[in-house]
Amino acid sequence: MELTPEAIREARFREAWRGYDRSEVDLFLDAVAVAADGPRADEKSLAAAKETVAAMRAEAERLRDTVSELEARRDELRSTITALAVHLKAEQTRVRALLNELSARVDADLSVAVPPEGPMPDIDLEDVATAEANDAFFEDLRASIAADDGSGLFRKRRHG
């Protein structure tokens, strides 16, 4: 007969005239069954703990992989941001140079020669608006727009 907690709990003895007190024997057998059950319960707890540890190790490995992927993505984004910042700086420099050149052209076109000696002639503002000097300025501006390198600074606006 195998001595298991269940076998101890189910043990029954024949009654004898001069035997032991039945209630004391039953209490003792219950205590022995509980004591015998202890190692089995510990084995079950240990097995459950091992399963939990294995699951937690697998989860930790999955999280390490996720962290590695996120760090790689972060590095890619940093590189992209750095490249974009360099590109933006170059474009800002190019646009400033273009604006300075255009400003110099406008200033040159608007500069006025030294007036001749004598009284100032009467100027009709309508004649000035249509003068050939203004036409030359606008032709030069149109040429600058036509020579635009695609920066979009002089894109024509379409209304409609």
Image (tube, rainbow, N blue to C red):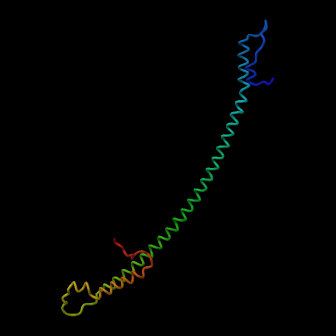
Q: Residue at x 71, y 12 (%)?
A: 23
Q: Residue at x 70, y 23 (%)?
A: 34
Q: Residue at x 25, y 84 (%)?
A: 129
Location of residue 158 (image quadrant): bottom left
Q: Residue at x 65, y 43 (%)?
A: 55
Asked if residue 29 is positioned above or below residue 54 in the image, the reply reads: above
| Along the line of sight, the residue nearer the viewer: 72 or 144 | 144
Asked if residue 146 is positioned above or below residue 114 in the image, the reply reads: above
Asked if residue 120 is positioned above or below residue 98 in the image, the reply reads: below
Q: Report x, y in % for residue 144.
A: 39, 82
In the displayed image of the protein, which residue is found farthest to the right? Answer: 1
Q: Report x, y in % for residue 2.
A: 80, 25
Q: Is residue 140 left or right of residue 25?
A: left
In the displayed image of the protein, which residue is found farthest to the bottom? Answer: 117
Q: Report x, y in % for residue 26.
A: 72, 15
Q: Is residue 64 left or right of residue 99?
A: right
Q: Report x, y in % for residue 47.
A: 70, 36
What is the quadrant of the C terminus in the image?
A: bottom left
Location of residue 4 (image quadrant): top right
